[in-house]
């Protein structure tokens, strides 16, 4: 069995509860454009058969997997999860409220959307102050817990799919290639075309500095959350 599943089952046994384990993680925290996406995935291991563990034997931190592998695992995660919740925070919210606050809030909202609450809830890296779901922060959780790794993949695949669709509305910035991250191509597009509504004005970027763009409060676009 993948050691990530062993970790989850061990956490449930240590807590003296049923092996219903949820993990929460995010994608897009370091991007220059597009939303932050948090996901929570709950697995009920009491119902699993050997073939379920085998289908997800390749679970790992989404950053360690190629896009094709993430997509394949996403298709295996969805039918095996008891519950999945996805929460987005827009670039406008990030600029107005701050990235870290939006990140913690989105993770807490994703966990809170899992009903009934999981017996064990694990969050990658951060304790969520004020979260209504009892949980444990796990440093490097997306490489230690199967549920957190699954949440990492769900968040990443969801965000990448969204950014590729948004490319159709904002083709100059080539979001289908870099999905909003700070690549040389993205920097050049910003220098050439400026910023669109998807860009986070509060981020410090070389491309922003070249355009002498600093953070300024902005009115919410019509489609912002």
Image (cartoon, grey):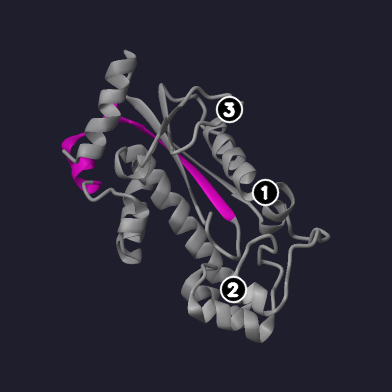
Outermost residue to the bottom: 192
- Tell which of 204 and 92 is nearer to you: 204
How far apart marks 3 and 2 lie (CA) works out to: 36 Å
Asked which quadrant contains residue 168, the reply is: bottom right
| Sequence-earlier tag: 3 or 1 | 1
Residue 173 percent location from the top left of the image: 59, 79
**Residue 158 visible in the shown view:** yes
Residue 170 percent location from the top left of the image: 64, 77
Mark in the foreground, 3 or 1 = 1
Residue 155 percent location from the top left of the image: 47, 51
Left or right, 122 with reference to 14: right
Dot 1 corresponds to which residue? 98
Q: Is residue 7 above or below residue 193?
A: above
User: Is disc 2 placed on a helix, strand or loop?
Assistant: helix
- Tell which of 16 and 51 is nearer to you: 16
Asked which quadrant contains residue 162, the reply is: bottom right
Q: Residue at x 52, y 57 (%)?
A: 28
Outermost residue to the right: 219
User: Is disc 1 placed on a helix, strand or loop?
Assistant: loop
User: Is disc 3 placed on a helix, strand or loop?
Assistant: loop
Q: Is residue 28 above or below residue 213?
A: above
Dot 3 corresponds to which residue? 131
Q: Residue at x 73, y 67 (%)?
A: 214
Q: Is residue 84 above or below residue 175?
A: above
Left or right, 203 with reference to 183: right
Left or right, 169 with reference to 5: right
Dot 2 corresponds to which residue? 206
Residue range highlighted in magenta:
36-56
Mark in the foreground, 2 or 1 = 2
Residue 86 percent location from the top left of the image: 53, 45
Q: Is residue 50 magenta?
A: yes
């Amino acid at each position: 069995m993948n050691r990530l599943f062993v970790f989850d089952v061990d956490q449930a046994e240590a807590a003296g509860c049923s092996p219903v384990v949820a993990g929460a993680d995010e994608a897009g925290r370091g991007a220059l454009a597009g939303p932050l996406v948090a996901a929570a995935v709950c697995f009920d291991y009491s119902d699993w058969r050997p073939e379920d563990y085998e289908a997800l034997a390749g679970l790992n931190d989404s950053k360690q997997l190629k896009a094709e592998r993430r997509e394949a695992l996403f298709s295996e995660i969805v039918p095996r999860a008891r519950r999945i919740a996805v929460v987005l925070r827009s670039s406008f919210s990030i600029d107005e409220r701050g990235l870290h606050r939006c990140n913690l809030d989105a993770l807490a909202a994703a966990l809170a959307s899992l009903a009934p609450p999981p017996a064990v809830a694990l969050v990658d890296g951060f304790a969520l102050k004020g979260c209504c779901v009892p949980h444990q922060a796990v440093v490097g959780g997306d490489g230690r817990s199967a549920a957190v790794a699954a949440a990492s993949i769900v968040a990443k695949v969801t965000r990448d799919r969204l950014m590729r669709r948004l490319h159709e509305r904002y083709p100059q910035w080539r979001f289908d290639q870099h999905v909003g991250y700070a690549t040389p191509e993205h920097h050049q597009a910003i220098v050439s075309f400026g910023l669109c509504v998807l860009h986070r004005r509060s981020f410090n970027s070389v491309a922003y500095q070249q355009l002498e763009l600093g953070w300024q409060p902005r009115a919410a676009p019509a489609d912002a959350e």
